Amino acid sequence: MFMRSTATLAALFFVSTAPLALAAEKPTDPQIAHIAYTAGTIDIEAAKLAIKKSKNKEIVDFAKDMERDHEAVNKQALDLVKKLKVTPEDNDTSKALAKAAKEEHAKLAKLKGAAFDKAYIENEVAYHKQVDSALETLLIPSASNAELKSLLETGLKIFQGHEQHAEHVAGMLK
Amino acid sequence: MRVPLLVPMLATALFASPAFAATIEVTIDKLIFSPASVAAKVGDTIEWTNNDILAHTATVKGGWDVMIPAKSKGKVTLKAAGAVDYFCRFHPNMKGHVEVAP
């Protein structure tokens, strides 16, 4: 069942663990598209919050980069699913992602100043790490359409860059 | 003036700029400048072709700053000799290098 890989992926997103053995069941392309799009939207929302709240130039610049890139990738993803006539399909992984993001958003919204900056950038490091790992070990290998796979691979390159960028910004705050 | 037999080779350069300045092509693909290092002369133009779905820049600290929109091009004409490192402001781990001869 899909449930098993969903649980694996959900675990991957919420608990920082060593690379894990993947369940035999793979998400389908419509589910992968939904997961990828949801993950992008979450980071755009976090970026918007940071742009609004932070007074730190490095943080605001980083957040603007996140907003710009994830919007570009999500637009590309929408164009692709339209072209392939695939309807993204909501699933437990997407739901779990959205739920965790809502909690993180609420947590960040309460913070101010340097405490906000620190929590935001640390979450960005962790979040990109988890998304990159999910892309690498589950989403890319599971994608059956070549164009979807290629877009996910491009996304992985971009998000690995974000992860390094976030680590750099986090290092500067210390 | 008689144009030498190098016409096809020089056509692009002539079209883009006066004199015999060259245009040096750099491609951006999946957040990588390729070639990462190029040699040029003062007066030459560097033209970046961005194959990515993201906007990039080619930026020198205290120097030129070229916007290279997604699936588009950007260029700069080199005015000063010397070696410069450039990077993308949006993706600071993207790096390139230009050696500019006088």
Image: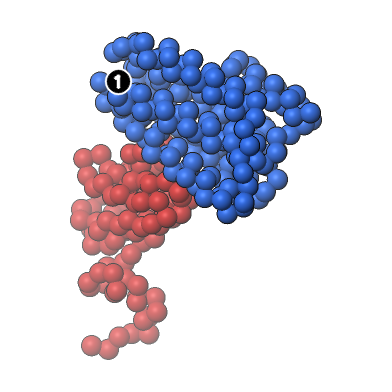
Chain colours: A blue, B red
Q: Nearer the viewer, residue B75 or B95?
A: B75
Q: Residue at x 37, y 85 (%)?
A: B5
x%, y% of residue A37?
Answer: 53, 36
x%, y% of residue B1?
Answer: 23, 88
Q: Is residue A15 visible?
A: yes
Q: Nearer the viewer, residue B60 or A93?
A: A93
Label 1 amino acid?
A: Lys
Q: Quadrant of the N terminus of chain A?
A: top right
Q: In which quarter of the view is residue A56 placed?
A: top left
x%, y% of residue A97?
Answer: 56, 24
Q: Is residue A22 visible?
A: no
Q: Quadrant of the C terminus of chain A?
A: top left
Query: Badge 1 is on which residue?
Result: A53
- SS class, disc 1: helix
Q: Nearer the viewer, residue B46 or A24?
A: A24
- Chain designation of label 1: A
Q: Residue at x 50, y 47 (%)?
A: A76
Q: In this rendering, is residue A152 above or below B78?
A: above
Q: Residue at x 61, y 40 (%)?
A: A88
Q: Residues within 10 Å of mark 1 (few under 14, many from 20)?
A: some
Q: Residue at x 59, y 33 (%)?
A: A35
Q: Nearer the viewer, residue A133 or A46?
A: A46
